[in-house]
Amino acid sequence: MSPGIWEKNLAMLHSRYPELAQQVEKNLSEDFLPQTTRTTGIENYPPWFIEPTPSGYPTLLYQEAGGASKILIHSQRDPFREAQRQAENSLAEIEKSKKNGDENTGRIIILLGMGLGYTAEALAQKNITLIIVERRREIFTLALKSRDLENLLAPGNSLFVLGDGSAAINAALSLVKTQKPLVIKNRALTGLTEEDTNWYDDVERRINTWASKEEINAATLERFGKRWTRNLAANMDGVQNFPGVRYLENLLSNTGIPVFLAAAGPSLNDTGKHLPQIHRRCIIIAVDTSLRFLLLNGVEPDFVFSVDPQYWNAQHLYRLSAPNTALVAESAVYPAVLQAACGGMQINGSNTAAFRRVFLCQSLFPLGRFIEDRTDPKGVLAAGGSVATTAWDFARFLDPGAIWIAGLDLAFPGYHTHYRGALFEENAHAASSRLCPAETLSIKSLENGVPFPAASTSGGKVLTDKRLSLYAAWFENRFELASQTNFSLSPGGLAIRGITAAKQEELLSLPPRREEIDELLNSHYRHIDAEYSREQQEREARYLDARSDLTRGLTEIRDYARDAASIAKKIPARPSADETARALKKLGKANDAIAKSPVKGPAGFLFPPMESIEEGLRETDPLKRHLEFSGLFYQALAESVEYTLGFIKNDAPRG
């Protein structure tokens, strides 16, 4: 080690990455002591060995105790030039993807395995976002002790993920957004041992899942966007009628009362006979898919969640009655859910409310938020793509003593998808035949999710899939940031960092709190009702104003878009300079008006992907191509706005 390198690197680390510097110093151990090699005078740190190369740049080797030979981590001749070539090839690969039409490819590189930092250093000098992931903290320390890393650290624009910090990995992945990162590996490090291979494989799966989430979201919008719009239009009156979850924030603060969250995975079966005892000790939160199970076992939860807009999802609550349960919903749920909750359920010939009351959380969609923000803000709950993610965030929102979770398997233990008797299972049996039994349908549903084995909570392996692993990444990030302790009662489920495995006996050993819980809820509900009733007239006036503003704003955007589309399409094949200038001026005016509209969010919600418009272009001349694109763009905008307007005005067919 050259004199002063460690001190210089550490000082720079404190300047550019102060938290990382503290982490490095905190993890320095007395066991991490050097041994000087007599022949070279270089300090080594078994099992890591730093040796000189003909280029003058040191290289890194690894040798397990008793191992026959050393494993080379970098080039034995010129590790610096090797890294330069890899950086150049990586940038060329990004540019090649862009030229091939993959516009989602971004200048984001994730480096798995840092070593002494040669490749990271080369990439840090380029105009890219660089994320460096290194499982072994001691390697980063070795790099700081062995090489001058000014070219890597001084720019201060790289992101380091060291060790087993899943929250840091998820934070780094948030930079990916809609862009596809390029992943490059130091294969000597990523495959050094079985533990290294498994760790980096897990990171790479997480990267691939995270990078694909926007594609999944876009596909979901394309498939369900119109359904969301129809539901929001039908449920819009609920914005003024139902209070928001903001009235429940910190409800359990300083009470020590725990929450039991019932997701719908196979492990929920194990809690059935204990549910009455759990109900005595906890606030019970169920997802819509698990409500049937709780009711069959004699327990009405305190809250049940429904956020999915689809008809088939509404069937999970069909004809279920839980008069002691509060429904928490998003305003885009299938309308029958809120109708039943408000008294639209027929029991013994009379209308009966399926639930005790309804709370709304903030809409996930701009149409719903436009009305809510101007009428009655509902309170934000995080969404991770699954009803279980929102239900968990609500549990955290209450600020309980702890959160106990059952049925959050995020996997298929025993090749099961849900608890016994779930609607999914009943539908499979109903659709089965002699040549296509329920088991065949179940296997097909497993295969459709791109299944793969992963670590389970109990330490073995369990089958999961791409979609569930995305939820797991979301939970890992949230668990590590939450102040509450989260306990898992799903031993056969997917291993999720940040949650503690526990046994049901531990939950059942808690003291009964049901009388206290009921009194707390009853008192709080009375307070909400009194406050909400006092504001009814003002809230109704705000709601009517919001609907009027929305209708007027959408109408204006539709008309602007129609005029702009007409202008673009009427340009002559060979326009004069004056004709071109006038057309472009009118298009610019329309574009400015739309961009400044307060309803541009709801207006653009159903807008098709830009790629679908560009695919239809035929012109090659730049000006003509721009005008052709403008005509198609504004026509698509006018059509999507007209669709939304039709449902808001109640003059479009339902269905």
Image (cartoon, rainbow, N blue to C red):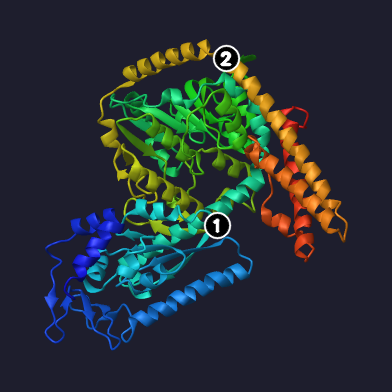
- Tell me the quarter of the picture where residue 645 sits: top right
Q: Position of residue 139 (x, y in %)?
A: 26, 68
- Expressed as whole percent of the image width and height from the top left, the position of residue 372 reads 57, 27
The picture places residue 176, in percent across and down from the top left corner, at: 48, 56
Residue visible at 30% across and 71% down in the picture: 193
Nearer to the camera, 434 or 397: 397
Image quadrant containing the N terminus: bottom left
The answer to whether residue 654 of the structure is visible from this angle is: no
Q: Nearer the viewer, residue 450 or 1?
A: 1
Does the rendering let one see residue 196? yes
Image quadrant where one finds the C terminus: top right
Query: In the shown orientation, is residue 141 left or right of residue 385?
Result: left
Name the one closer to the observer, 537 or 511.
537
- In this image, 526 relative to 306: left or right? left
Q: Quadrant of residue 651?
A: top right
- Number of other residues with Cα within 10 Å of mark 2, as a class: few under 14, some 14 to 19, many 20 or more: few
Mark toward the start of the polypeptide (1 vs 2): 1
Residue at 28% from the left image edge and 27% from the top image edge? 256
How far, Cα to Cα, is label 1 from label 2?
53 Å
Image height of 388 relative to 628, above or below: above
Disc 1 marks which residue? Answer: 447
Q: Amino acid at mark 2?
A: Glu
Q: Nearer the viewer, residue 107 or 586?
A: 586
Where residue 314 sits in the image (x, y, percent)? Answer: 60, 33
Q: What is the number of the mark on residue 538?
A: 2
Front of the two marks 1 and 2: 2
Task: Classify mark 2: helix, strand or loop.
Answer: helix
Three-letter amino acid code of the residue under disc 1: Glu
- Count every numbered label the image shows and give the total: 2
